[in-house]
Amino acid sequence: MVATVHAFLYSLSPRPPWVRSLHLLSSHTLLLCSRLVFLTCGHFHLRTNASYRRRHLSLVKTSSLSLLLHSCPYCTELREIFSMESKRSAAPVMATRKSSKGSKQETGKYKHTIDLPKTTFGLRANSVVREPEIQKLWDDNQCFKRAVDSNTGGTFVLHDGPPYANGKLHMGHALNKILKDIINRYKLLQNYKVQFVPGWDCHGLPIELKGIFETFYNSIFKSYLYFVRYGVWADWNNPYLTLSPEYEAAQIEVFGQMVTKGYIYRGRKPVHWSPSSRTALAEAELEYPDGHVSKSIYAIFKMASASPACHDIVGEFFSDLCLAIWTTTPWTIPANAAVAVNPELNYAVVEVYSIPEETIAFHGKPTKAGAILKNVEKKPFVIVAYDLISTLELKWGVKLIIKKTLPGSTLENCRYIHPISGKECPVVVGGEYITTESGTGLVHTAPGHGQEDYITGLRYGLPILSPVDDSGNFTEEAGPFTGLNVLGDGNAAVVKYLDENMLLLLEEPYKHKYPYDWRTKKPTIFRATEQWFASVDGFRESAMEAISMVKWIPPQAENRITTMTSSRSDWCISRQRTWGVPIPVFYDIDTKEPLITEEIILHVKAIISSKGSDAWWYLPTEELLPEKFRSVASRYERGTDTMDVWFDSGSSWAAVLRKREGLGLPADLYLEGTDQHRGWFQSSLLTSIATTGKPPYLSVITHGFVLDEKGLKMSKSLGNVVDPEAIISGGQNNKDGLGCGADVLRLWVSSVDYTGDVLIGPQVLSQMSDIYRKLRGTLRFLLSNLHDWEPGNSISYDDLPMIDQHALFQLENIARIVKDNYESYQFYKIFQILQRFAIVDLSNFYFDVAKDRLYVGGSTSFTRRSCQTVLAAHLLSIIRMIAPILPHLAEDAWQNLPFEFVMENGSLAEFVFDLRWPEVNERWLSIPAPDVDFWGLILELRSEVNKVLEAARGGKLIGSSLEAKVYLHTSDAATYSRLREMCGAMHEADSLRRIFITSQVEVLPCLDDKIVRGIQYSASYTNQKAIQIWMGISRADGLKCERCWNYSPKVGTFSDHPTLCSRCVEVIIKDTQPVQAAAEIC
């Protein structure tokens, strides 16, 4: 293998730069491959003392990565990934953006007194360009390592389940890796030392089928690049690959421990066999595609003898008596060893009374009657389950006349004539698998071709015959069918043989789930072969107990893995492939007896640890055996079986968690797709329990599959495949208008309930893009209105207006709920909460109301500084809440922060993940419940007032809401009192007119008819507590202020500033004395 790798690399023309220094690399396959990938990538942390200027990001034109992309002939696709980036100049693009100037300013002598928003944070994300720039910023400054090293909490280990190192990444990969990254980034903010080692399963790769080595390492390289492009943080410098010598040695160690404990044995029993791959397969290596149709038959086996109890009942029919069986695998008839019955069922001897047409139709299925049913001269008597008689009459198209009934137990020890060999075979008692749901109630039993048949055969000592070779062809043991393929002409030949010998009742197609090889996509068979097995029975009870100790998310996942583990048979761990970790066993050349000892396993482990598993194939047997066996080495040959790929990946806890510094057992979390209940979750559990007695994980999260918007499985033939690369960078020609960036993809991941199947498509992505833009707009509003703010400008909580205190109350509640949902991994709830809070609640209320005091309240005024205090709190909190999900957006905002943020330890937070999750601020949550309820009423009232304002606007009474005066009346004394208080509020920000964004609000003690008649637009509103409030709208009193556009009777009363209201005059002349207002008008 090593020679092959070197030959391939040196054959490249032109030769990539990294090939010239190959002598510096490890000679092992893994280290060679991994260094090829990792030493050439500019994203890895191989640079020290990288220069960095805060808020200035640039893309280096020339790097080791760019050299690789332009020199390697196999990297065309990789160049396409970064094509957009290479076109951009190296000029700074972040903080040097042109400042936003806000809305168009009205000309006038007071325009310089308006504090319009200013920020370098652009409204357009330009994610295709800027996200890679942010990733380069992280890489240059080793932000992941920086965050881990600075955190002082405990270690958090999410163990990465290795994806196969072949094929293009799809939406399932994106969902999986992004979910993991969201969790890891949240844990970083929670002060954990996050350890995340990415991995690739290299033995699951169908390299033997393709024979193209470059496909292997290019696949790893490309998948690495895409994972990084998704924004995934990991220890990319030190991934694990299942073909690395240290990994393979750890796997051999696990195998050896299971051998020592007596859990490994060699036996002949039926296993899933793939003729197309010529190897045994585990259940997890199978798939069950829709639409498979088998050729099923009803056949009869002639009775040879009966037990005394049975003969007394059926003796008079014996000369023509047959057993009726049904099977979907006619090719297994040559291996038949018995017919099984259920002793709890009743059976009947029936006479076939009528003869059907040659071809009949039953429930729309074309069926073909056998020759025996066309024979009008002789009518057979058959034994079938009593409860199936009516069903069989319809299916066979005959009348079945009941002659005798008998219990199933009396059929045991009867004998029949084998339909092909002519030997006598027994009737045996089977298990609960024999039912009356289908078939005849009698089961054709071939112990060499079925698990239940095998178990029954062991009980009765039946021969385990499997006359099928590795390619799925009949052997000489199958007699007249020798050489025919069991899944093709061999199957048809058996059916024809039965029919010619008057043993076929009916042939019909049967549509059902059938196992296929997941690699070749071709049908498999059950076939008895000599294999190595792990005896699950030896530790099943411990495994079941361990399952109950693990936290499963969602909870129903526990039921699934419990069912699978409790019912699984012994684990076939051997495979007939050359690509994989060998089973370290030797065989006596003459007797074929296996030689496997603890000493041999330890010796082989040491060889593999230093030379890799390739050594098993090229070293002489003498070197592979320990010293004490070398004198007899000529008597032995090495085994050619390799280990099941699920044993490979299922040993990752031993090779990674137990061997890597900073990691440990058990892992805090495993997270993979729901199909891993029968795959990695289970194989990891079984190997760990068998060797350590403990599960390898504390918690397990499973996610569903990704479907299109209609809930259909994605396929090229349907044209509904959604490519994560296209979502991020636009793909070729960007025909779908994608190129949304990684954060939009990550936002989608956070929006779905991943515990079930999830949907994605153009419409969904369009919605995600819109929400992302609004979130970005929220951050931009916060940043732009803090352009002149410093932490020293903060207003103490006790001095804040009520509206600001209530805003902080809402923020703290949101932060608490968001944290709870991060802890429970319910990211879709976080998506919903933040979408409503940041986009709806803040933008539609607080931001809307705040604009007046931010823009015209006075640069250094109390009202503006109090608002900025709240905005700063929101910015710092929202950035941290979205950072795990939208890290690029959070970092982009942080790099445009207009002020420096010093953490509790006194250090400056240069990057967003220098931060910690905000501590709970109990003071902000201390607002009395009645005040919280009242603010709820105010928010509801504001919505109702807006409806009346809209009606007045529609009627041309007003244009802007500032042209309006609002009248309120309620008969509820407490509410009336609180509303009047707000009109005379100590802080102008709490006044109703500022909350409603109108020029005046008057609270009426009673509804005077004269006032009511003069108000054209009015309405009433009743809240949930049955408090009714009347609302009316008229034009505002006074003239329009040139500076703030509010209407006021005071406009025109100031000689120096005749066009301004009193508030604006105060701001202009910096008069700190408040202007008095009427008691009931605000």
Image (cartoon, rainbow, N blue to C red):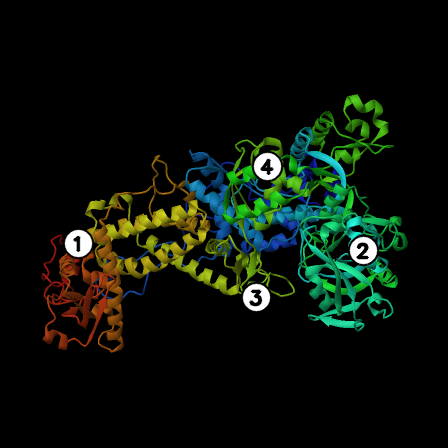
Looking at the image, tell me whether mark 3 or mark 2 is earlier in sequence order. 2
- Name the side, left or right, on which 139 lies relative to 1071: right
Label 4's element?
helix
Task: Mark 3 and mark 2 in contact? Answer it, CB < 8 Å.
Answer: no
Residue type at mark 3 is: Lys
Residue lying at 53% horizontally and 33% vertically, measured from the top left: 663
Image quarter in which the C terminus is found: bottom left
Q: Which residue is mark 4?
A: 541
Looking at the image, tell me whether mark 1 or mark 4 is earlier in sequence order. 4
Task: Mark 2 and mark 4 in contact? Answer it, CB < 8 Å.
Answer: no
Q: CA distance from mark 4 to mark 3?
A: 56 Å
Label 1's element?
loop
Residue 895 visible: no
Q: Which residue is mark 1?
A: 987
Q: CA distance from mark 3 to mark 1?
A: 55 Å
Q: Please identify, in this view, whether the residue under mark 2 or under mark 1 is nearer the observer.
A: 2
Image quarter in which the N terminus is found: top right
Label 2's element?
helix
Residue type at mark 2 is: Trp
Q: Which residue is mark 2?
A: 331
Looking at the image, tell me whether mark 4 or mark 3 is earlier in sequence order. 4
Residue type at mark 1 is: His
Q: Please identify, in this view, whether the residue under mark 4 or under mark 3 is nearer the observer.
A: 4
Label 3's element?
loop
Q: CA distance from mark 2 to mark 1?
A: 90 Å
Q: CA distance from mark 2 to mark 4?
A: 37 Å
Residue lying at 38% horizontally and 58% vertically, measured from the top left: 777
Q: Which residue is mark 3?
A: 735
Q: CA distance from mark 1 to mark 4?
A: 69 Å
- Residue 613 in picture, x, y percent from top left: 72, 35
> Foreground: 24 or 580?
580
Residue type at mark 4 is: Glu
